[in-house]
Amino acid sequence: MEKRITGHTELLGLIATPIRHSKSPVMHNAACRALGLDYAYLAFDIQPDQLEDAVKGFKALNVRGWNVSMPYKTSIGQYLDHITPIAKMCGAINTVINDNGVLTGTITDGTGYMNALKDQGIDIIGKKMTIVGAGGAATAIVMQAALDGVKEISIFNIKDASWNRALENVEKINSQTKCKAQLFDLNDHETLRKEINESAIFTNATNVGMGKLEGQMVLPDTSYLRKDLIVSDVIYMPEKTKLLEEAEKVGCQTINGLGMMLYQGAASFKLWTDQDMPIDKVKEALD
Ligand code: SKM
C-alpha cells in the first residue's frame, strides 16, 4: 500500500459518523490497487457541526470524490452545486463528484441493490416487489426499482416517523414512473400475506435483524414465505439475518446486503475514475 502512495496520489473518501466499521475503504483501495489507479480512499468520522467545513476542505484539497453515509445523506446537498434527478427523487446523496471545484451529488444505493440482484441472476423487471421500510435504503431501492421497470411495489411500514416519507415515495413513484406503488400498514397481516403471495421478491429494508434487533424479523412467521419467493435483506452484518435463515429453510433464494454495498461502491467508483470496479478482486479483498 505504502509503495503505491506518491506525491501524485489523489484522495477519495467517505464521510459519516460512526464510520470505522465501514467496508468501503477496503473495497475502493483494493479496486485502485488492482487497476493501478493512483488514488487512496479514506474514511473520515465527521461531527455534524463540521460537515460544511469538511466539504469546503475537500474542495480546497481537490478530493476527486467521496461517499456520504449516515447521518449526512439528507443534509449534504445544501453544500453542493448540483444534485442529480435520482438523488432529488430519493431526497438523499451518497456520492459526491468533484469536477475541478464543481460538486455534484448523486445516489448509487438503488443501482447498487438492482445490480446486486443481477449479479445473482435475479431479474425483477416487469414483476412485483414487496418491501418493508421507508428509510434511506428503502427509498433508494424503491425509486431505482420503479425507474428500472419493476411493475408494482407494495411498501409496508409501521406508522412511525417515516410513514409520511413512505407516502411521498409512493406519490413520486406513481406520478414520475410507470410503476404502481402502494403503501400499507405492516400490522395489516392479511394484506401483507396477499401482497407477498403476488410478489416475485420480498425485501427487508429496515434494521430489524441487526444490532439490538438481531434475531428478530419483520414477518410474523414463516408461513408468509414460499419456495419460489426471492428473499433479500439490506443487512450484511450479521451475514444471515433471522429472515434469511428462515427463508433458506423454506427453500427460498436469499440475498443479503453485501451485494448492495459492493455495487453502490462500484457505481461511485465508476463516476470518480471512469473505470469499472474489478468486482472479483474486490470480493476477494472483502473475504
Ligand atoms: O451508501 C453507502 C455509502 O456509500 C458507504 C457506506 C459505508 O461505507 O458504510 C454505506 C452506505 O451508506
Image (spheres, rainbow, N blue to C red):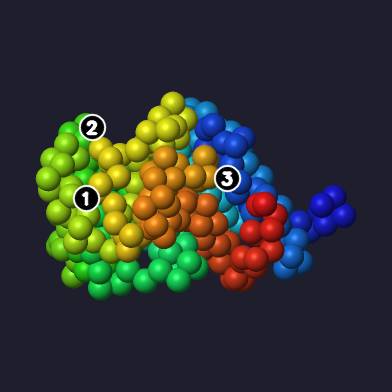
Report whether the residue tagged 3 is closer than 8 Å to ligand 1: yes
Residue 261 — which label? none
Q: Nearer the viewer, mark 1 or mark 3?
A: 1
User: Residue beneath label 2, please?
Assistant: 161
Residue lying at 19% horizontally and 61% vertically, measured from the top left:
198
Q: Amino acid at mark 3?
A: Leu
Residue placed most toward the observer, 103 or 66:
66
Circle 3 sits in a helix, a strand or a loop, which is it? strand
Q: Residues within 10 Å of mark 1 (few under 14, many from 20)?
A: many
Measure how far apart labels 1 and 2 are at the Cα level. 15 Å
Residue placed most toward the observer, 156 or 108:
156
From the viewer's perspective, tell me whether residue 269 is left or right of residue 26.
Answer: left
User: Residue beneath label 1, please?
Assistant: 155
Q: Amino acid at mark 1?
A: Ile
Residue 14 — which label? 3
Residue lying at 66% horizontally and 60% vertically, measured from the top left:
282
Residue lying at 41% horizontally and 50% vertically, measured from the top left:
249
Residue 183 visible here? no
Measure how far apart labels 3 and 2 are at the Cα level. 27 Å
